[in-house]
Image (spheres, rainbow, N blue to C red):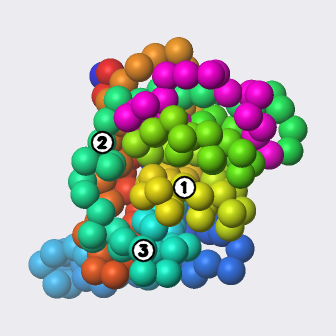
Amino acid sequence: MIVDLSLPLGEDTPVYPGDPEIKVKPWAFIDRDGYYMNALKLGDHSGTHVDAPAHFIPGGKTIDEMPLEKFIGEAFVLDLRDGEGPVKLDELPDSGYYNRIVLLLTGGREISPEVALFLVAEGVKAVGTDAMSIGDETVHTILLTAEVPVFENLDPTGLEQLLEKTFTFIGIPLKIEGGSGSPVRAIAML
C-alpha cells in the first residue's frame, strides 16, 4: 500500500508569507501544437518540499549536493496535535529515533529548539511536519547544521493514516543546481 503525503501543487496551494506565488501557465495545447505542456513559476520551497542546509546555513549543502539516502528510510508519525504553542520535549517519546525519519502531525504547530536539539542528538535521519514551517530560524539552523533534511507541508490526512505504523518514507527532491530546497512527491510505503 502507498500513502501519498504530498499536497497538490498549483496556483491555489498556500505559500509561506513572502515566498513567490505558484503560477501554472498553459504553454502548449494538443489541438494547436500537437502536445500539451505547462510553464511553472514557483519557489524551491513550494508545496510539500524539503529544506537543504543551504536554506539557513552559509556554505551549507545545496539540494543537489545532498546524498539521496537522506530522503528515504524507515519512518513513523508522532501525533502532536493536542498541545498548544511550540512542541515541547516532554511531548515526545524518549527513544526510537536513531537513523529513522520522524514525521510530526502537529496541526500546524512548530517545534521548539529543545525538540530540534533532541532529534539531532538522537540521530534522526530526517524530520517532517504537516506545518508550513518546522520552526523558527533557530530550529532550522539546529537541524540543517546537522544535515538533517526538513520536510514541510506534508499532507495531514495522509499522516493520520500512518499513526501507530512503521513504513518506508520516500521524498526525493528535484536535482536543482544550487537549490536551497525542492518540492517533493512524498510517499509512505507500507
In the image, residue 97 lies in the stretch drawn in magenta: yes
Q: Nearer the viewer, residue 8 or 69?
A: 69
Up-down relation of residue 71 to residue 4 (above or below): below
Look at label 1 and name its amino acid: Leu
Q: Which secondary structure, mark 3?
A: loop
In magenta segment, residue 151:
no
Q: Is residue 106 visible?
A: yes
| Image coords of residue 125 (percent x, y) | 40, 42
Circle 3 sits on which residue? 60
Q: Residue at x 78, y 37 (%)?
A: 88
* Distance between the alpha carbons at the discs numbered 3 and 1: 12 Å
Q: Position of residue 157 (x, y in %)?
A: 57, 33
Which of the marked residues, 2 or 1, is nearer the chain's N terminus? 2
Q: Residue at x 74, y 28 (%)?
A: 91
The boundaries of the magenta stretch are 86-103
Q: Nearer the viewer, mark 3 or mark 2?
A: 3
Query: Nearest the camera: 43 or 91?
Result: 91
- The disc label shown at residue 72, or none: 2
Image quarter in which the C terminus is found? top left
Q: Label the magenta part by its dominant secondary structure.
A: loop
Q: Earlier in the sequence, mark 3 or mark 1?
A: 3
Badge 3 amino acid:
Gly
